[in-house]
Image: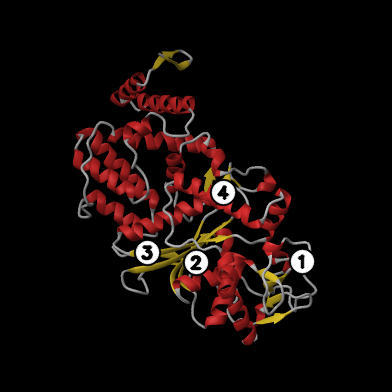
């Protein structure tokens, strides 16, 4: 089956063919590094990590660029609040980002450019846009993009210029010819720290947000590349502005395929600091192991909303334990995947249809059922190999089943008891007995009674 990807630009699932045979060039918007990464960052980066892994499993070479925004109003404010330099703050937050992403088995990108290293390229784009009449110098020193002069603005998000209002974009500024115009180059303020401004022919200042990605993407991947990705919240205005800048300057399409992952909701409400339902990855890792978090993200389709809750994560942990339980005690045979195998073929068909991870995970459970019955090392090997394309099932099974790094022991035990109760309810007494025996081997003794099952450590 041919790989098909949903393209936000056309609003259709399309056959994907790399611009350069055998090589995919992919740009994914990264983190603005002023604080610890949150669960929304985990969702987006795991989604595109799975896409990359599948492209590579399909025999394609992937050049993966994920930028680091290390200059921004929020960064400057936080550095001033902390009494540290912008560089000290961003260096620290980049290191913390990689602690979290490495724990979640997110592959390092081919390139992770910092915006501050590409300011000359950004200024080149601004000058080109000004020369083409798409940018103008405003009072106060800013350089703005003239949105209405670019034919096609709104084509990614489907927004009409007449329907847009300044409140959806930025506060109306007197220096703008049109309230929809956005800043390419911000004039420096006297109160800002020295390492937050650059000299240019436009005067001291710093780049606007969207121009950063235009410069980094085109510098590293060319003026047109295969995939541009990011969260649904970036579709407008950030990605719309990237298109306007890049295509306005270069005269060619920026990206062939645009991919956007869905939002994270917390108990069915969109995650937001203002609502107080905001969780960092570090906070979640205190209660749940990293692979459980990854599995929780992977089992949902990347374009669907993801509803975060402790209940859902506990359920994910129990499901992942069932997969690892199938591998426990079996010496899995290592080798390449036989894509002619019926289950492997179904897995591939699911992933080739817009990275259909829910169906692919369902195949993993079918294969785990086979391994439970047969204890066949070859089938166990296929289970691990297919799991690897999703970044799952690569730990020794015994290690995961003992709880996993960062997991709270009592939470793990309760999840196993819940799993055992479900097996008993389904009259799968062999599975229930196996869970009891595994807990006993770890020194956890169960006692069934009228009020349910209790446990003690031997």
Indicate the quadrant where residue 76 lies.
bottom right
Q: Position of residue 114 (x, y in %)?
A: 55, 62
* N-terminal-most mark, 2 or 1: 2
Nearer the camera: disc 1 or disc 3: 1
Q: Which residue is mark 3?
A: 62
Quick one: SS at disc 2? Answer: loop
Q: Which residue is mark 1?
A: 189
Task: Give the alpha-carbon distance from disc 1 to disc 3, as whole Å.
Answer: 41 Å
Q: Which residue is mark 2?
A: 8
Question: Is residue 349 positioned above or below 310 on the image?
Answer: below
The residue carrying pointer 2 sits among few (fewer than 14), some (14 to 19) or many (20 or more) residues within 10 Å by Cα, namely some
Task: Give the alpha-carbon distance from disc 1 to disc 4, as whole Å.
Answer: 28 Å
Residue 450: which numbered mark, if any?
A: none
Task: Give the alpha-carbon distance from disc 2 to disc 4, as whole Å.
Answer: 26 Å
Measuring 35% from the left and 74% from the top, which residue is drawn there? 20
Quick one: SS at disc 4? Answer: loop
Count of all numbered marks drawn on residues in the image: 4
* N-terminal-most mark, 4 or 3: 4
Q: Is residue 158 visible?
A: no
Nearer the camera: disc 2 or disc 1: 1
Nearer the camera: disc 3 or disc 2: 3
Q: Position of residue 329 (x, y in %)?
A: 25, 31
């Amino acid at each position: 089956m041919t790989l098909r990807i949903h393209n936000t630009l056309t609003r259709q699932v399309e056959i994907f063919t790399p611009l350069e045979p055998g090589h995919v060039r992919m740009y994914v918007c990264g983190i603005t590094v002023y604080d610890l990464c949150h669960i929304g960052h985990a969702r987006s980066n795991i989604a595109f990590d799975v896409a990359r892994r599948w492209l590579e499993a399909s025999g394609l070479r992937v050049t993966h660029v994920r930028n680091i925004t290390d200059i921004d109003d929020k960064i400057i404010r936080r550095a001033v609040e902390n009494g540290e330099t912008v560089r000290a703050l961003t260096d620290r937050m980049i290191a913390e980002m990689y602690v979290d992403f490495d724990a979640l088995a997110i592959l390092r990108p081919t390139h992770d450019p910092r915006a501050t290293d590409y300011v000359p390229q950004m200024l080149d784009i601004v000058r080109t846009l000004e020369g083409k009449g798409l940018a103008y110098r405003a009072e106060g020193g800013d350089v703005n993009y003239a949105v209405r002069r670019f034919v096609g603005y709104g084509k990614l998000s489907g927004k009409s210029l007449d329907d847009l209002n300044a409140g959806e974009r930025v506060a109306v500024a007197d220096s703008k010819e049109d309230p929809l115009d956005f800043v390419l180059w911000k004039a420096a303020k006297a109160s800002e720290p020295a390492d937050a401004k650059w000299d240019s022919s436009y005067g001291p200042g710093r780049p606007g947000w969207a121009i950063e990605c235009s410069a980094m993407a085109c510098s590293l991947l060319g003026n047109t590349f295969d995939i541009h990705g990011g969260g649904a919240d970036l579709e407008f205005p950030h990605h719309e502005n990237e298109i306007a800048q890049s295509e306005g300057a270069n005269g060619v399409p920026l990206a062939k395929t645009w991919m956007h992952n869905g939002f994270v909701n917390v108990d069915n409400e969109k995650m937001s600091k203002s609502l107080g339902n905001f969780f960092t990855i570090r906070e979640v890792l205190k209660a749940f192991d990293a692979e459980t978090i990854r599995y929780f993200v992977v089992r949902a389709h990347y374009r669907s909303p993801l509803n975060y809750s402790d209940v859902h994560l506990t359920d994910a942990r129990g499901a992942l334990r069932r997969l690892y339980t199938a591998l426990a005690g079996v010496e899995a045979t290592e080798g390449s995947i036989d894509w002619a195998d019926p289950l492997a073929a179904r897995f591939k068909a699911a992933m080739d249809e817009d990275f259909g991870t829910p169906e692919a995970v369902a195949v993993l459970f079918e294969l785990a059922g086979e391994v439970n019955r047969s204890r066949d090392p070859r089938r166990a090997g296929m289970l691990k190999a297919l799991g690897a394309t999703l970044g799952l099932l690569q730990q020794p099974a015994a290690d995961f089943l003992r709880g996993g790094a960062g997991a709270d022991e009592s939470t793990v035990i309760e999840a196993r008891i819940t799993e055992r109760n479900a097996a008993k309810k389904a009259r799968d007494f062999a599975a229930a007995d196996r869970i009891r025996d595994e807990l006993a081997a770890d020194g956890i003794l169960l006692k069934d009674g009228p009020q349910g099952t209790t446990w003690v450590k031997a």
